[in-house]
Image (tube, rainbow, N blue to C red):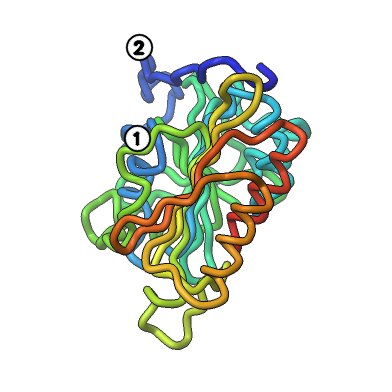
Amino acid sequence: MRGGGPPEIVSRGAWNPSDFGVGGRLINWDFEGLGDALGMYPEDLVFAFWINMTASENLTDAAAQVLPPTVALTFRDQLNLYPSPIDSFSWGLFGDEFVEFHWTRPAPLGSRGLSVVYNGYQMMPIESTDLFRVMGTPVLFGSEPAVKKVLDVLSGQASTTEVFVLPYDEADVLQMSCLGKDSVENPNIMPPLGGEYVESYLGASPSDGGFILTAKYLSLRGASEMRVRDLAESWGLSVRDEGKMVTVSGLVEPGNLVGTLGAFAAP
């Protein structure tokens, strides 16, 4: 779909992760939005996003231009990782590592190379790379150290992130959240977008031939606040102040989608 119909809800339906035909433990986790995905990431997560790629081709294409390069999004047309397409996925950054979660219909999947068993899960190598997959709904994808860190969380041996508050209960087709300068206490950790706020949320969904954009900033201040308000005025979007929260929202024309996503992702 391009542009403006209601988003298709990606449901697990009758999907069973055992249909991948892989032994050992399998991931089985709710994956209806970023709020669900956050529970699988480790506690040092600083930046994450989730996107339903079945809802709007325009939005998927725009996200590919604005968001960091990912296997599921950037290379979706070049790689055939699974028998079925990836319907939705999440990407998260923690420390110097990142992983992806791929939501795809389970089907028998072969593996070339020797699997690494960790916490009862089979880490299946990707041919000619240093990347691994752990099968389930969703599939975990990343480097060996990053995948093991996530498996520690899923196994209850390590804590998940508890810092993020904005993505929960959101229903946007594209959902992105990032910690700002004011939320990271470790001076050696620099938030990737470097904004003057505690946390940001950016969401977008198709509507009325365009896209509804929502940007939220917790404890926004300084140059970032000035830029957010200037950007909202220049793009014709509304600004609402409520306590420590600043929310920008409004309808964006398809031709302005890439520009507005990029502007409000990193003000």
Dot in front, 1 or 2: 2
At mark 2, the secondary structure is: loop
Residue 15: x %, y % from top left: 38, 16
- Quarter of the image where the N terminus is located: top right
- Residue type at tag 1: Leu
Residue 68 vs 6, above or below: the answer is below
Q: Residue at the spot x=69%, y=39% of the render? A: 257
Q: Residues within 10 Å of mark 2 (few under 14, many from 20)?
A: few
What numbered label is drawn on residue 26? 1
Residue 29 vs 231, above or below: the answer is above
Query: Relative to 86, is 24 on the left or the right?
Result: left
Q: Residue at the spot x=43%, y=68% of the render? A: 220
Residue 10: x %, y % from top left: 45, 21
In front of the other: 86 or 52: 52
What numbered label is drawn on residue 14? 2
Residue 228: x %, y % from top left: 56, 61
At mark 1, the secondary structure is: loop
- Residue type at tag 2: Ala
Quick one: which residue is furthest to the left in this view? Answer: 156
